[in-house]
Each structure stands twice: as C-alpha cells, then as structure tokens.
Image: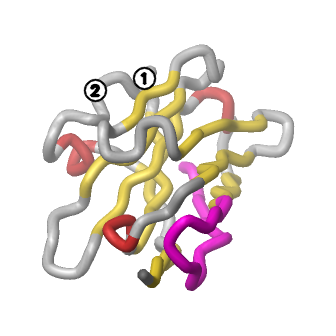
Amino acid sequence: QVQLVESGGGLVQAGDSLRLSCAASGSTFSNYAMGWFRQAPGKEREFVAAISWSAMSTYYADSVKGRFTISRDNAMNTAYLQMNSLKPEDTAVYYCAADRGTGNSWSTPGFYRYLEHWGQGTLVTVSS
C-alpha cells in the first residue's frame, strides 16, 4: 500500500511558476510509476504527466508539453511537477497517482479510474 501526500499548490498569476511535490510512504517507491492528474470544477479528471519507475520515460498531455516537467527522486520517495508559464486554464485540483507499470497508458482518457493509489489533491489557482 502506498500513501501519497501532495503539496505546493497555491494562488499565482498567469506566467508564474509552481512546483508540486508528492511524498510517498508505505511501500517501495521505486516500484511504481508516478503521475499527475488534474480536475477543474465541473470537468472530468484529466491526465497531466507521468514518469516511469526508473525516470527513463516521461509522458505529457499536449496542453502542458513544454511548460511542465515531471521528475522523481527515488531516494527521497518524492515525485515533482514543475509548472512554468502557468495559464488560467491550468486552474484545478492536482492529484498525484501511483501504480505499477510504466505510465505509458495513463494518458488514455478515463484510464485514471484504474489507478490504484491517489493523494488527496492540492489546489492550483492561476489568475489572469
């Protein structure tokens, strides 16, 4: 069992940067692919980024490619999402997820329903 705790959300202006962290505990962190999803009010949860257990592979939604960077530190049991050039449409609750596998299927719409471990979410608000 993996417990995930996100942090780093907040209120920023368009063009600013934020770094989200996801601290994991309870199991061998390096066994899991990690990823970030987000959910805006009234919308379905959507994929943002994923990273394989080895950090050799990363995957991004088209909407964040070139602006967001996912990374992980297996020694610290932590995954990160560096978000640059934030836009108002990035406003959402951001959730960290962990599951076995490589993360390469996580961008499939609705795939989030099959992921086993989730954090409680952290709110990111981007004002214009």
Name the mark on residue 101: 1
**Residue 33, image x and y in percent?**
51, 32
Q: Is residue 111 magenta?
A: no
On screen, residue 92 above or below 18: below
**Residue 58, image x and y in percent?**
50, 25
Q: Residues within 10 Å of mark 1 (few under 14, many from 20)?
A: some
Judge by depth and name the residue closer to the eye, 105 or 38: 38
Judge by depth and name the residue closer to the eye, 59 or 13: 13
Q: Residue at x 59, y 59 (%)?
A: 3
**Residue 73, image x and y in percent?**
77, 37
Q: Is residue 8 magenta?
A: yes
Q: Amino acid at mark 1?
A: Gly
Query: In the figure, is residue 68 to the left or right of 105?
Result: right
Query: In the figure, is residue 66 to the left or right of 92?
Result: right
Residue wearing tag 2: 105
Name the mark on residue 24: none
Query: Which element is circle 1 on?
Result: loop
Q: Residue at x 46, y 77 (%)?
A: 126
Whether the residues at callouts 1 and 2 have beta carbons within 8 Å, the answer is: yes
Q: Residue at x 15, y 70 (%)?
A: 43
Q: Amino acid at mark 2?
A: Ser
Give the magenta-colored segment's residue range. Answer: 1-19
Q: Residues within 10 Å of mark 2 (few under 14, many from 20)?
A: few
Query: Which element is circle 2 on?
Result: loop
Query: In the figure, is residue 6 to the left or right of 65?
Result: right
